[in-house]
Image: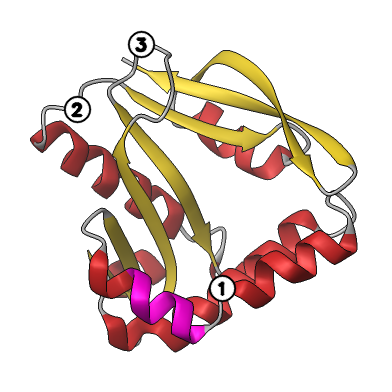
Amino acid sequence: MLTDLAHVRPGRPEDAEALSRAFRESWLVAYNGMMPAPQLRTFVERRDAGWWRDALARTQGQLVVEVDGSAVGYVTFGGSRSSLPYAGEIYELYVAPLQQGHGLGVQLFESARERLDRRDLKGLLVWALTDNTIACEFYRRRGGLETATAIERFGHKLLPKTAFGWQ
């Protein structure tokens, strides 16, 4: 089983190339046709290996999942950026498309949740684009309750997003 071979650990600058690839692949698969193509392309191009190297060198709230010595997914987390009654937040959670469906996202989610609990950030919030049914179902299966909705602008397009919460 793949999850037996996977290892969740803090991200390191040497993960930059692999995370850039995992980010690009997961965003292109998840948001193709949902976001306007120019904005999607710009988002993906901005997160090149240099961007990841800098982010990994300065940020504490991130974990990667490694399979066969290579980072294939990541989660970023910290204090909630919302006025909703949740102290912790998962900002991003992505796994490369070819690695999805094997429990790696669950490992990242639970590891981030545990780290937030250790920081006494009780209650967890995650936002997902409402049309991203795979992500929304993932959070529902983890026990997340839909707690709020909002609109996110991507270029000329307004996309609804849903907040999932855990107490």
**Depicted 36 relative to depicted 137: above or below:** below
Give me the disc on residue 155.
none
Range of residues picked out in magenta? 49-55
First of labels 1, 2 by sequence position? 1
The residue type indicated by label 3 comes to Pro
Which mark identifies residue 85?
A: 3
Other residues around mark 1 within 10 Å, as few (<14) / some (14–19) / many (≥20):
some
Q: CA distance from mark 2 to mark 3?
A: 11 Å
In terms of secondary structure, where does tag 2 sit? loop
Q: Earlier in the sequence, mark 2 or mark 3?
A: 3
Is 45 left or right of 69, judged from the image as shown? right
In the picture, the quarter occupied by the N terminus is: bottom left
161, above or below 145, in the image: below
Q: Amino acid under label 2?
A: Leu
Q: Is residue 103 magenta?
A: no
Q: Residue at x 63, y 25 (%)?
A: 162
Instruction: Please tell me which residue lies in front, 61 or 5.
Output: 61
Residue 136 relative to residue 111: left or right: right
Q: CA distance from mark 1 to mark 2?
A: 28 Å
Give the residue pinned by disc 1: 47
Q: Which residue is mark 2?
A: 121
Q: Is residue 53 magenta?
A: yes
Report whether 47 appears left or right of 150.
Answer: left
